[in-house]
Amino acid sequence: QVQLVESGGGLVQAGGSLRLSCAASGSILRIYAMGWYRQAPGAQRELVAAITSGGSINYVDSVKGRFTISRDNAQNTVYLQMNSLKPEDTAVYYCNADATSPGGWGSFRSDYWGQGTQVTVSS
């Protein structure tokens, strides 16, 4: 099994910055990609940013130029640097990993999720 633990959320004023971290642990054979999703109250969860093991990156249009995703593959950790935060960025941010771990009959590839960290941006 793979466990993801997020940290770095909090309350910040508009225009401020936060840095989210997500560390993956457990029985990991390979992580193909990691990313950040967010979900505001009453809204659907959306992809914010993702990065593959090969370094490919994509962002949702609304955060381009403001957010930066990065990985430390040796530590199985993904970061999300969030600058110029806006009130509409307020949401619970969830870490996601596309990973393979040992299964009872062999390897098992699945999406794994963290518990989420709250980001609140005040105006």
Image (spheres, helix red, strand yellow):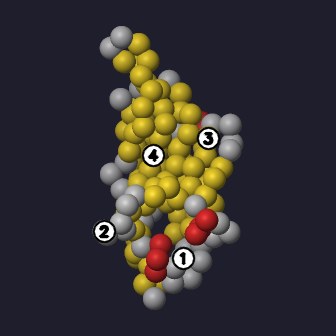
Q: Residue 52, labelled with which disc?
A: 3
Instruction: Please name which of the two marks, 1 or 2, marks the residue nearer to the observer.
Output: 2
Image point 33% across, 14% down: which residue?
104
Q: Quadrant of residue 61?
A: bottom right
Q: Quadrant of the N terminus?
A: top left
Q: SS class of the residue under badge 2?
A: loop
Query: Which residue was labeled with disc 1?
Result: 85
The answer to whether one can see residue 11 in this image is: yes
Q: Earlier in the sequence, mark 1 or mark 4?
A: 1
Query: Cα distance, mark 1 to mark 4?
Result: 21 Å
Q: How many marks?
A: 4
Q: Find out whether the residues at labels 1 and 3 contact each other: C-beta distance under 8 Å.
A: no
Across and down, in percent, residue 114 comes to: 37, 48
The residue carrying pointer 1 sits among few (fewer than 14), some (14 to 19) or many (20 or more) residues within 10 Å by Cα, namely many
Q: SS class of the residue under badge 1?
A: loop
Q: Earlier in the sequence, mark 1 or mark 3?
A: 3
Q: Residue 42, labelled with which disc?
A: 2
Across and down, in percent, residue 42 comes to: 30, 68
Residue 48, above or below 84: above
Query: Cα distance, mark 3 to mark 4?
Result: 12 Å
Side of 26 where 63 appears, left or right:
right
Q: Nearer the viewer, residue 93 or 11?
A: 93
